[in-house]
Image (spheres, rainbow, N blue to C red):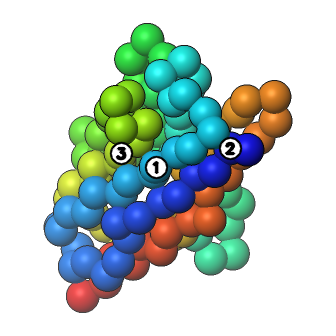
Amino acid sequence: QVQLVESGGGLVQPGGSLRLSCAGSGIDFSIYTMAWYRQAPGKQRELVASMASGGSTSYTQSVKERFTISRDNAKNTVYLQMNSLKPEDTAVYYCYVRRYRDHWGQGTQVIVSS
């Protein structure tokens, strides 16, 4: 059974940084594309960043140059380093992987506010 557990969210001031973590069990992260999504209040869930098994990465335009996705295959963990945070980054952030079907974590709340 695949389980994804996110952590690292919280309240941060504009311009600040956070690092989200997603720890997985029941799946070998190293052979799958891992992704981070987010959902802001009243908005649809959107893809933020993804990392393929080979290491190539992709980002939505609004977070390029500010967010970095990475993975530690030995720990079966994927990270999202978020710098220069803006109020519009406020959302619940979800870890995602597709293995036969979609798998989501429970989400971690990020609030960017002064």
Residue 88 position, x and y percent, is: 42, 68
Kind of element beneath mark 3: strand
Q: Is residue 98 above or below residue 19?
A: above
Q: Tell me the crowding category of disc 1: few under 14, some 14 to 19, or many 20 or more residues within 10 angstroms, Cα based.
A: some
Q: Tell me the crowding category of disc 2: few under 14, some 14 to 19, or many 20 or more residues within 10 angstroms, Cα based.
A: some
> How far apart are the two marked residues, 3 and 1, measured between alpha carbons?
9 Å
Residue at far bottom of view: 114
> How far apart are the two marked residues, 3 and 2, measured between alpha carbons?
18 Å
Nearest the viewer among 21 and 92 is 21
Q: Sequence order check: which comes first, mark 3 or mark 2?
A: 2
Q: Which residue is mark 3?
A: 79
Q: Tell me the crowding category of disc 3: few under 14, some 14 to 19, or many 20 or more residues within 10 angstroms, Cα based.
A: many
Quadrant location, the N terminus: top right
> How far apart are the two marked residues, 2 and 1, measured between alpha carbons?
11 Å
Q: Which residue is mark 2?
A: 2
> What type is the residue that disc 1 sits on?
Ala
Residue 21 position, x and y percent, is: 38, 53
> What type is the residue that disc 2 sits on?
Val
- Residue 57 shows in the view: yes
Q: Is residue 2 above or below residue 12?
A: above
Nearest the viewer among 49 and 60 is 49
Residue 91 position, x and y percent, is: 51, 69
> What type is the residue that disc 3 sits on?
Tyr
Q: Which mark is residue 23?
A: 1
| Residue at point 22%, 79% (across, down) | 13
Q: Sequence order check: which comes first, mark 2 or mark 1?
A: 2
